[in-house]
Amino acid sequence: MSAGPIAELEGLLGDYPLDDAFDEMREPNGELREHYCALAETLAKLPTDELKRRKQSADISFLTQGITFTVYGRDEGTERIFPYDMLPRLITAREWEHIERGLTQRITALNHFLRDIYSDARILNEKVVPQELVYSCKQFRRQMRGLQVPRNVYIAVIGSDLLRLNTGEFVVLEDNLRVPSGVSYMLTNRRVMKRTFPQLFHNYGVRPIERYPQLLLSTLRSLAPEGRPEPNIVLLTPGVFNSAYFEHTYLARQMGIDLVEGRDLVTHDNIVYMRTTDGLKRVDVIYRRVDDDFSDPLVFRPDSILGCSGLFNAYRAGNVTVTNAFGTGVADDKALYAYVPKIIRYYLDEDPILPNVETFLMTDEKERKHVLANLDKLVVKAVGESGGYGMLIGPHSTAAQREEFAQRIEANPRNYIAQPTLDFSRAPCLIGDQLEPRHVDLRPYILFGDKVNIVPGGLTRVALEKGSLVVNSSQGGGSKDTWVLQD
C-alpha cells in the first residue's frame, strides 16, 4: 500500500476525523504516514470477524494472566482487567534516537540535582532554583542531608511521560522518580501483540524490550553495598491491595528475586534480614515500591505497618541499598518540574533536548492571577498527586468545579501548578469494528546504574473515552504496545 490513497482501509476508517492534533497514522491531508503502511495493509486484508477473534484472544490472554490494576474510590469494585488496544503505536528509529538522547540528558541532570541538594546545595545557594521551593516540598527528606548514596545514584528506575504536540515534537509532561509503575504492562502488551500479529511483528523488525527485567536486575546489582559481590536482592511491596501489585509480583518473578512485605523484614545491628523458612537471610538491595512515608515507622510515619523498622538506619550505615533513594520525590514535584530546563543547563551546560510544557507556578502572584482568570482554558494539577487525581481540566469542567479549584489555589498556592490544555497526538484504536483516533502519551522506562539503559519503547497510554484527554488507567484510560522500528 502506498502512502497516498487509503481506499483499502475505508471500511475500517468510517468516521475518522482529522483535526489540529498530530495523528500518528495519517498526514494532515489524510494520507498514511509511510511507517504505518504495512500495518494498514494488514488490517485492510483481515475480515472483520478475524479482527474480532484476535481481539477476543488478546482479552482472554490478559484475563488468564491476571493482568489487572486497582481503582480506588469506586463503589462497583476495585480490581479490573487492564484496558488494552490491540493496534500498536509505531515510532521510527530517528524519532526514538531523539527521545533516547533527551531522556538520558534529563535523568543525568536530575540525578546531579538530587545529589547537590542533599549535600552542598550549590544550585540553591546560587539561586538557580529557589530554596523555598525545595525545602517546602513534602517529599524533601532532611534525613538524607550528607548521606552517601551508593555510586551517587539517587534514581535508578525512572518513568517520564512524553506528549507529541501538533508540530510533531515530543515534550516532557512530567517525571516519575519515586515508584514509577506500568512497566509490567509494557512487557505483557508485547507478549500479547507478538501472538496477535506475529507476521506483521516480524516484518516490521521491531526492536526488542524483553530484556528489561534482566537490565533492571543488573542495575540493582550494580548498586549493591561494597563487599557484597553476590547481593541478595528483594522487591518490597505494600501488599496485595496496592494498585500495582500485579506488577510487583510479575517483576519479582521475571528477575528471580523474592517479593517481600515489610513484615517479612527485620533489622539487627543496622543490617536488614529477610525471614525465611530456613531462618534469617541478609538483604543487600531493596527495590522499593513503597513510598518514603511508609518505609520505616521509626523515621517517617509512625503509624505505618507497610515498612520495616530500622530500615533507614541500615541504609544510612551503608549496609543495604534502597532504590529509588529516599527523598527523590522532590525532583518529580510538579512545581520543581518548571525548573528542569535550568537544572539541565546548570549541571550539563546544555540546552534541553526534550522541552518542557509551559508551566505556571501558583506561588508567583502574577501567574496565579492569570490562571485564576483563565481556569476554563487551563489544566490545574496538584504538585504531589499522580494517576490523574487532584486535577482540573478547564475546558471539560463545570463552573462549580472551577470555583472549587480557585478556592483551593488561593488557600494553598504552593500545592498547585497550571499548564495549557494541550491537544496532544492521537493514534488509531480499534473501537468496535472500526478505527477511531484516541489521544495517547508515552512513558519510556529509564534505568540508571553504572550506565543509562532505556529499552526501545515504553508504555503508550490511551484515553479510550472519546474526546477524553486523560490517559490514566484509574480515569478510564488504557494502553497500547509501542513498536520502535529498526532503521
Image (cartoon, grey):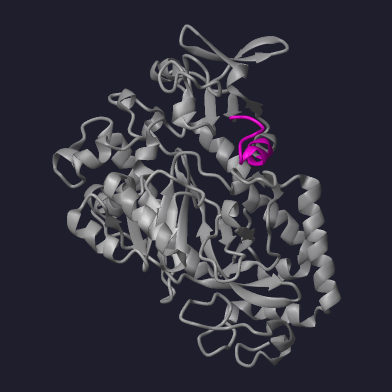
Query: In this rendering, does residue 83 appear at all?
Result: yes
Q: Is residue 335 above or below residue 151?
A: below
- Numbered range of the magenta stretch: 238-250
Classify residue 263 by image quadrant: top right
In this view, the residue in front, 93 or 4, is 4
In this view, the residue in front, 331 or 100, is 331
At which x and y percent is residue 456? 55, 57
In this view, the residue in front, 246 or 355, is 246
Classify residue 330 by image quadrant: top left
Query: In this rendering, does residue 210 appear at all?
Result: no
- Asked if residue 248 is among those painted magenta in the image, a careful observer would answer yes
- Asked if residue 361 is among those painted magenta in the image, a careful observer would answer no
Q: Is residue 328 above or below residue 297?
A: below
Q: Residue at 64%, 76% (x, y): give it.
A: 436
Say left or right for 6 vs 447.
right
- Residue extending farthest to the front is 400
At which x and y percent is residue 394? 41, 64
At which x and y percent is residue 306? 55, 24
At which x and y percent is residue 443? 52, 55
Q: Residue at 50%, 39% (x, y): give it.
A: 179
Q: Is residue 305 above or below residue 468?
A: above
Classify residue 85 by image quadrant: bottom right
Q: Residue at 64%, 39% (x, y): give it.
A: 251
Say left or right for 223 vs 233.
left
